[in-house]
Image (cartoon, rainbow, N blue to C red):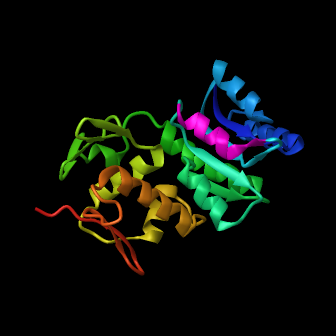
Amino acid sequence: MHYSVLIVDDEQELSEYTCRYFNMSGVSAAFALDQKAALDFFSENTCSLILLDINLGKDSGFELCQMIREKINVPIFFISARQAEDDMLLALSIGGDDYICKPYSLGVLLAKVKVALKRYEESGKSESEAETKNLVKLGNTAIDLSKAVVMKGEEKILLKAMEFRLLVYMLNNRNRIIKKEEFFEKIWNTEFVGDVTLNVHIRHLREKIEEDASNPKYIKTVWGSGFILEDKP
């Protein structure tokens, strides 16, 4: 069976209430209380988005995220009471697409989830994607936008959903400085996204596209403003 959202959180009362709230709001949801239950879920079901707590009793949400990422490429939003920047950086570095701090408003959480689902579940290509050719070359790197795949020589590298959206937007606005606020509005469709989230995704893109991520040729930082994808003849 397919669900829009899987909630993985060891707080049973919160998980049940959030799941019920989502279902009553027209977003099909299921929940799992630990790592084993989450993995069992995927043996018979699928979902379009995962809300994942870091603390899962004796299990780690970080570890579960890595296990899921090896097989499934769906958005993973970490939800946690831990607000240290190191936790946020680690969550995003291992495959998370967003980081939401507890306590949160269920209404705000539902709104963020609906926006993400609209972006990820829409059939066909978005207007911005349609404007871009399926195969793009940046130096020796080839990007297949129909499959969200980067080719470096014979090496095939998959782009995560959020990385793909960021790349397509930058390609369609190449050689123009894009402010951080514009990324938050156009990619996340919300202002409630921190610089850490954007910076980590940009770093991952550089690692997949640039020959030298520490000295990028294409995706450059414009200090105090934002980023630019330079692709000049």
Whether residue 26 appears in this view of the structure is: no
Q: Position of residue 162 (x, y in %)?
A: 47, 49
Query: Which image quarter: residue 64?
Result: top right
Q: Position of residue 230 (x, y in %)?
A: 23, 65
Q: Position of residue 109 (x, y in %)?
A: 69, 53
The quarter in which the N terminus is drawn is: top right
The answer to whether 218 appears left or right of 91 in the picture is left
The quarter in which the C terminus is drawn is: bottom left
- Considering every residue shown, the one lying at the far left of the view is 233
The answer to whether 23 appears left or right of 150 in the picture is right
Above or below residue 115? Residue 16 is above
In the rendered image, residue 153 lying in the magenta stretch gets the answer no
Q: Which residues are magenta?
A: 59-70
Q: Say which residue appears at 54% left-offset and 46% top-offset.
A: 95
Q: Say which residue appears at 55% left-offset and 66% top-offset.
A: 196
Whether residue 107 appears in this view of the structure is: yes
Above or below residue 167? Residue 72 is above
- Considering every residue shown, the one lying at the far right of the view is 13
The answer to whether 48 appears left or right of 211 in the picture is right
Q: Say which residue appears at 18% left-offset and 53% top-offset.
A: 139
